[in-house]
């Protein structure tokens, strides 16, 4: 699984910097950095929060602000046996169709984006789920009521890493489900010395 590769790095190289984030909005040299152990600790805190809410083996729509904590959020979901579906809210009807086709059961967003999500949540009949554990990470969770989505089989979800939406030339959302088995071999291959 994808998150297992990160766990391995956190064990082997806990104090090495694994992420550097520069928003591009601040002065040079003000990049944020975290180590593998810090990343993994954040991911495990989030995993515990998801599991305490019985979020496992489901697809979670994610609407996040670019930042150094995004990888920890995604790793927390993956280590909870969830898949994530990134989306933006441009084109409300398109986004609703895409989330329904992706069979997202939840939406996870940075709290600062909650106002922007209101029209989408209204259309998807989304219900806010309070969580102090997620709030301390600046996150808000919403449940999409069951009548709005049909579920993916548990076996299929367990193997999914993420899903994406593409529309091609038709402007109709098409969901691509990406299992761990499609990603992990590529990452392992990239880690090998190139001849």
Image (spheres, helix red, strand yellow):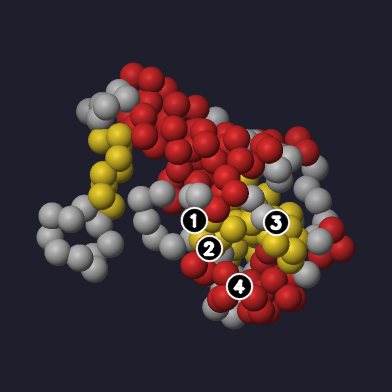
Instruction: Point out the frontmost of discs 4 and 2.
Output: 2
Of 47 and 82, the residue lying toward us: 47
Residue position for label 1: 138
- At 73% across and 40% down in the image, what residue appears? 54
Q: Is residue 148 above or below residue 162?
A: below
SS category of the residue bearing label 1: loop
Residue placed under numbered mark 2 in the picture? 111
Image point (57%, 70%), residue name: 114
**For residue 58, which quarter of the picture?**
top right
Circle 2 sits in a helix, a strand or a loop, which is it? helix
**From what the image shows, is residue 28 above or below residue 179?**
below
Badge 4 or badge 1: first in the primary sequence = 4
**Kind of element beneath mark 3:** strand
Q: Quadrant of residue 41?
A: top left
Residue 13 shown left or right of residue 143 in the figure: left
Alpha carbon of mark 2 to alpha carbon of mark 1: how far?
A: 6 Å
Q: Is residue 14 above or below residue 147?
A: above
Disc 3 target residue: 129
Q: CA distance from mark 4 to mark 2?
A: 10 Å
Q: Earlier in the sequence, mark 2 or mark 3?
A: 2
Name the residue located 30 percent from the left edge and 40 percent from the top edge: 34
Q: Quadrant of the C terminus?
A: top left
Name the residue beneath numbered marker 4. Answer: 117
Mark 2 in CB contact with mark 1 (< 8 angstroms): yes
- Where residue 72 appears, as percent x and y from the top left, is 45, 43
Q: Residue furthest front?
A: 132
What residue occupies the far left of the structure in this picture? 28
Q: Are marks 4 and 1 in contact (CB under 8 Å)?
A: no
């Amino acid at each position: 699984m994808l998150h297992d590769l990160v766990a391995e790095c956190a064990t082997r190289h806990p104090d090495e910097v694994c992420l550097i984030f520069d928003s591009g909005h601040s002065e040079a040299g003000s990049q944020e950095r975290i180590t593998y152990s810090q990343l993994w600790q954040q991911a495990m805190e989030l995993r515990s929060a998801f599991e305490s809410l019985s979020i496992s083996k489901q697809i979670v729509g994610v609407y996040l602000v670019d930042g150094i904590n995004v990888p920890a959020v995604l790793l927390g979901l993956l280590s909870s046996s969830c898949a994530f579906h990134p989306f933006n809210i441009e084109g409300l009807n398109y986004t609703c169709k895409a989330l329904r086709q992706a069979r997202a059961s939840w939406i996870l967003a940075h709290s600062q984006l909650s106002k922007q999500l209101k029209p989408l949540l209204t259309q998807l009949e989304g219900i806010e789920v309070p969580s102090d554990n997620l709030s301390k990470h600046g996150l808000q969770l919403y449940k999409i009521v069951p009548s709005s989505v049909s579920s993916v089989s548990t076996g299929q979800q367990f193997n999914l890493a993420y899903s994406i939406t593409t529309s091609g030339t038709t402007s109709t959302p098409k969901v691509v489900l990406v299992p761990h088995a499609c990603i992990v071999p590529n990452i392992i291959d990239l880690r090998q010395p190139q001849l």
